Image (cartoon, rainbow, N blue to C red):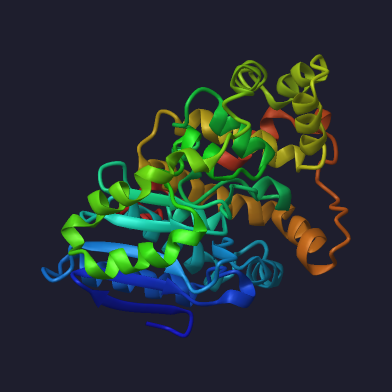
Amino acid sequence: MTEHVQTRVANRTGIITLDRPKALNSLSLDMVRALTAALLAWRGDAGVDAVVIASTSEKALCAGGDIRFFHEAGRATPQTGSPLLEDFFTEEYALNHLIHFYPKPYIALMDGVVMGGGMGIAQGGPDCGLRIVTERSKIAMPEVNIGLFPDVGGSHFLSHAPGRLGHYLGVTGVTVGAADAIYVGLADVFVPSSQLDALRALVEATPGAQLPAAIRAFAAPYASQAGAGELAAQREAIDRHFGADSVAAVMASLETDASPFAQKTLATMRQRSPLMMSVTREMLVRGASLGVADCLRMERSLVRRTFEHGEVLEGVRALVIDKDNAPRWNPPLLADVTPEMVAWFFAPVWPAHAHPLRDL
């Protein structure tokens, strides 16, 4: 346990509570290490049958990594890499892998903001993960907005979303609510926030081994209250436009569509980093044929390249540091992004035997 990560065991369930509300539970290296230590300890503990992760704040489960730290550390040593920055991404991605393959039910209460690194700690494995959303849930992989790419396993879980929905979410970085998150396969059940106290009481009263089934039964009466999302209604358009073979082709396709959805999507993309939209699309194409470990290894190399290039430092500067919302992307225009520029991001940073995540 650290200042921002509380852990306890109740009725054979390990309960993790994030408590950094002023930063919307943005992950620091210490928090990543505390989460990893708790999960490793409980993995082999016969007295723990399930894990629940939640927050002390209704505003967010986790808004992502601590991007102010990224900016400070990245500016200090942009070419050689900050040791703390290197440790952060290596250990965060190892944590994402641990969660994905956790041998016990891993239940995430995705109330409020769940973005970027928050998605990495919410997306449990397909066999025993359970992801709960509420009407307050704001789900996104918004990294292209700060000159990064959807990491923390995004190359896997977005590339395996139905149709081109993952490409749409990754390349645009848009935020979706509960109904859309369930539709895309990034959440499982809906519980209204008015019922969260009852849900917490259920967690306390139910033995860990029985918890996933008990939560699904508890949530079932509220399924229709998730509301109507936009993605199901726009599915045909998303698949058609984002099925194009490049970001430029996607935008050209959107330009031929006068619908409000297409024009809004086009306007959003014009604000994003042209380079990182292109890198993201290539990453999702590659990720579709890779397992989780190889996706995370690919992302680990990509994140080093991104800091070397500097796009993320400029994006964080514009959004968080100076707050002028006027990033000077490099290159500034999509037409100036070449295949060679994109390919450089995927060139190996380390030989396979020396990769920081070689043991995943």
- Which of 146 and 71 lies nearest the eye of the viewer? 146
Residue 126 relative to residue 240: left or right: left
Q: Could you tell me if residue 97 is visible in this image?
A: yes
Q: Quadrant of residue 189?
A: top left
- Which of 181 and 198 lies nearest the eye of the viewer? 198
Q: Quadrant of residue 103?
A: bottom left
Residue drawn at x 75%, y 27% is 261
- Which of 339 and 138 lies nearest the eye of the viewer? 138
Q: How many marks?
A: 0
Establish if 323 lies above or below 337. Answer: below
Q: Quadrant of residue 260?
A: top right
Image quarter of the N terminus? bottom left
Residue 267 relative to residue 61: left or right: right
Which percent across, then down, holds residue 196? 44, 63
Q: Could you tell me if residue 347 is visible in this image?
A: no
Establish if 176 lies above or below 62. Answer: above
Residue drawn at x 67%, y 19% is 241
- Which of 162 and 334 lies nearest the eye of the viewer? 162
Residue drawn at x 69%, y 67% is 71
Which percent across, then down, holds residue 280? 61, 37
Establish if 284 lies above or below 102. Answer: above
Which percent across, then down, holds residue 353? 34, 51
